[in-house]
Image (tube, helix red, strand yellow):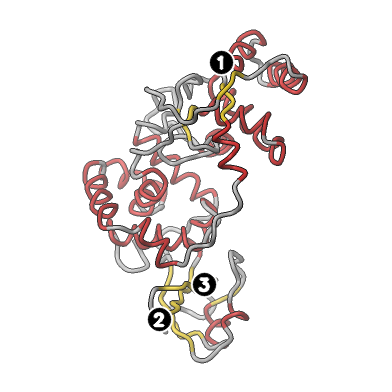
């Protein structure tokens, strides 16, 4: 696998630094890996200033929904998603039948994350995780934990530590799992003894389905419903990512939603800014589960709409 040049400023990680040397000693003992191997591995890591610069940027402005949608729910992404699903239908439908997780949602997540595995990142994971573990103090503890889990993946033969590509934050493979989530949720779907999230679509599908299932996916339930308002206060309704109300409670507050949906159904309310005014959605359990993959209501709606376009019916792919 070829590594693209990502930044003009890079330097080798100095393993004699006290914090690096301490990490080597602790992780070698805790993960039962050879200390010399680990030291040599980290000596190969390159500290990339571009990664630090990206992590240090002020939070991007919050895009309105209509701008966000133009990035993720495009005709090209829909077309490529349908082609990808057609090519790998046996795999994704098989996993869906076994787990109850929607095949179209699995494919849509891949579309949103990496354009169906075509854009898995331009940094070596070793460089990204080492840079953030030792030269990004704001979140050093978190990324040292992720680097340790990456080392454990390498120990187990589930990742090539010198060539595996990632996002600037170290997310791995077609589904963009952080190393901890690879260790917790990734599965060897084809039972070949390794977990390959880059090119083995059975492993990828099983892993995404397992992630969603472990976070509470409910088989056969819809994702969301479109809603209108009967003069309520939107600010009072908006609950962010909290899944803490019901359809009946929303109706009593002035939300008009399909009468076929039972009042006790757990729900969340979300307002989005479209190009010609606000739109409203009532999200159900599986919509909320998608926000566990990426903590964003816009991400959940983009995945939901993409899933609909790829292979499902409105609100229920």
State which mark lies toward you, 1 or 2.
1
Q: Is residue 305 left or right of residue 287?
A: left
> What residue is rendered at 37% in x and 56% in y?
71
Q: Which residue is mark 1?
A: 44
CA separation in Å, label 3 and label 2: 20 Å
Left or right of 48 on screen, residue 116 = left
- What element does badge 2 sit on? loop
Mark 1 or mark 3: name the one nearer the start of the chain. 1
Residue 107's disc is none
Q: Quadrant of the N terminus?
A: top left
Residue 210 position, x and y percent, is 48, 44
Q: Position of residue 152 (x, y in %)?
A: 59, 23
Q: Earlier in the sequence, mark 3 or mark 2?
A: 2
User: Which label belongs to residue 270?
Assistant: 3
Instruction: Tell me which label, 1 or 2, sits earlier in the chain.
Output: 1
Q: Residue at x 56, y 88 (%)?
A: 232
Residue placed most toward the observer, 70 or 106: 70
C-beta proximity under 8 Å, tags 1 and 2? no
Question: Mark 3 or mark 2, which is nearer to you?
Answer: 3
The answer to whether 296 is drawn above or below residue 208 in the figure is below
Disc 2: which residue: 260
Q: Residue furthest front?
A: 8
């Amino acid at each position: 696998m070829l590594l693209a040049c990502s930044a003009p400023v890079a330097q080798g990680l100095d393993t004699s630094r006290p914090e690096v040397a301490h990490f080597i000693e602790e992780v070698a003992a805790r993960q039962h890996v050879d200390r010399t191997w680990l030291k040599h591995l980290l000596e190969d890591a390159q500290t990339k200033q571009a990664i630090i610069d990206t992590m240090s940027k002020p939070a991007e402005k919050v895009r309105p929904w209509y701008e966000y949608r133009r990035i993720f729910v495009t005709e090209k992404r829909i077309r490529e998603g349908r082609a990808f699903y057609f090519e790998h239908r046996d795999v994704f439908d098989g996993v869906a039948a076994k787990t109850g997780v929607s095949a179209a949602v699995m494919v849509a997540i891949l579309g949103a994350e990496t354009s169906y595995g075509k854009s898995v990142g331009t940094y070596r994971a070793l460089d990204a995780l080492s840079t953030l573990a030792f030269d990004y103090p704001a979140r050093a503890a978190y990324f040292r934990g992720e680097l340790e889990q990456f080392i454990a993946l390498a120990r187990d033969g589930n990742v090539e530590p010198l060539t595996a590509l990632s996002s600037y934050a170290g997310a791995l493979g077609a589904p963009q799992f952080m190393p901890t989530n690879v260790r917790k949720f990734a599965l060897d779907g084809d039972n070949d003894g390794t977990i390959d999230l880059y090119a083995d679509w059975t492993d990828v599908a099983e892993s995404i389905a397992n992630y969603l299932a472990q976070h509470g996916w409910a088989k056969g339930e819809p994702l969301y419903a479109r809603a209108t308002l009967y003069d309520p206060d939107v600010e009072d309704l908006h609950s962010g990512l909290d899944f803490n109300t019901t359809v009946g409670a929303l109706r009593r507050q002035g939300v008009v939603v399909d009468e076929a949906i039972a009042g006790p159904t757990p729900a969340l309310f979300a307002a989005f800014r479209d190009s010609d005014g606000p739109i409203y959605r009532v999200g159900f359990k599986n919509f909320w589960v998608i926000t566990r993959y990426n903590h964003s209501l816009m991400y959940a709606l983009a995945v939901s709409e993409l899933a609909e376009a790829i292979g499902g019916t409105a609100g229920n792919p």
